């Protein structure tokens, strides 16, 4: 979990490979309307997010039933969004918050040609982010180290 450009997709793919389970890219579950809204520089509302979170949660639950585990990349910026995912998935869920400085995140976003999420929405995501509380089964990593090291730390925590 985390704001756009934090490295969710990179770490998620590495974790899924290591755990031999499916990787679900949360961006793939947005409606076409939500993608267009973001592409035009408008932040999503909760009304835009609820169906997206439900679709991702349901796909995650299905993947768990089929494969025993799943790794999903999703911003999950607010506790209410994480709670919505937990409810849709129906079993205990762990979150890994990836964070970095605003400047580093902005640099990453500006070097992602073709992605619909404009760098102009970073500040609204940072303002929305609610760091996980101790009861949420979450780990927080700063993405200043290579993805392979983040993967190894994540795997040690998950096991």
Image (spheres, rainbow, N blue to C red):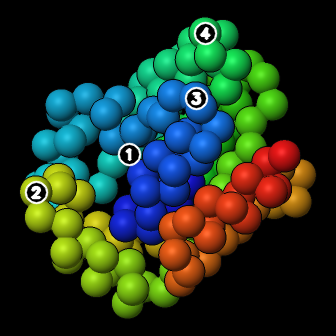
Q: Secondary structure under badge 4?
A: helix
* Vertical relation: 123 (above or below) 79: below
CA distance separating discs 2 and 3: 28 Å
Q: Secondary structure under badge 1?
A: loop
- Are the residues flagged by discs 4 and 1 in contact, CB closer than 8 Å? no
* Vertical relation: 61 (above or below) 74: above
Q: Residues within 10 Å of mark 2 (few under 14, many from 20)?
A: few
Q: Residue at 62% of width from left, 67% of height from top?
A: 150
CA distance separating discs 1 and 2: 23 Å
Q: Nearer the viewer, mark 4 or mark 1?
A: 4
Name the quadrant containing residue 86.
Answer: top right
Q: Position of residue 124 (x, y in %)?
A: 38, 68
Which callout, 2 or 3, points at the residue further toward the start of the chain?
3
Q: Position of residue 5 (x, y in %)?
A: 37, 67
For disc 1, the marked residue is 45
Which callout, 2 or 4, points at the residue further toward the start of the chain?
4
For disc 4, the marked residue is 66
CA distance separating discs 4 and 1: 32 Å
Q: Residue at 62% of width from left, 16% of height from top?
A: 67
* Vertical relation: 80 (above or below) 32: below
Which callout, 4 or 1, points at the residue further toward the start of the chain?
1
For disc 2, the marked residue is 114
Q: Nearer the viewer, mark 3 or mark 1?
A: 3
- Left or right: residue 23 versus residue 29 is right
Q: Residue at 70% of width from left, 19% of height from top?
A: 68
Q: Is residue 47 visible?
A: no
- Are the residues flagged by discs 3 and 1 in contact, CB closer than 8 Å? no
For disc 3, the marked residue is 21
């Amino acid at each position: 979990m985390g704001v756009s450009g934090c490295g969710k997709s990179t770490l998620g793919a590495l974790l899924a490979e290591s755990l031999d389970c499916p990787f679900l890219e949360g961006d793939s579950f947005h409606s076409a309307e939500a993608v267009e809204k973001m592409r035009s520089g408008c932040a999503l509302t909760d009304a835009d997010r609820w169906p997206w979170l439900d679709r991702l949660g349901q796909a995650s639950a299905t993947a768990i039933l089929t494969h025993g585990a799943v790794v999903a990349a999703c911003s999950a910026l607010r506790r209410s969004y994480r709670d919505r995912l937990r409810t849709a998935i129906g079993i205990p869920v762990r979150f890994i918050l990836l964070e970095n400085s605003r400047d580093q995140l902005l640099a990453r976003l500006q070097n992602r040609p073709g992605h619909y999420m404009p760098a102009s929405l970073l500040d609204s995501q940072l303002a929305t982010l609610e760091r996980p509380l101790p009861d949420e089964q979450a780990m927080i990593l700063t993405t200043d180290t290579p993805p392979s090291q983040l993967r190894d730390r994540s795997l040690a925590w998950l096991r």
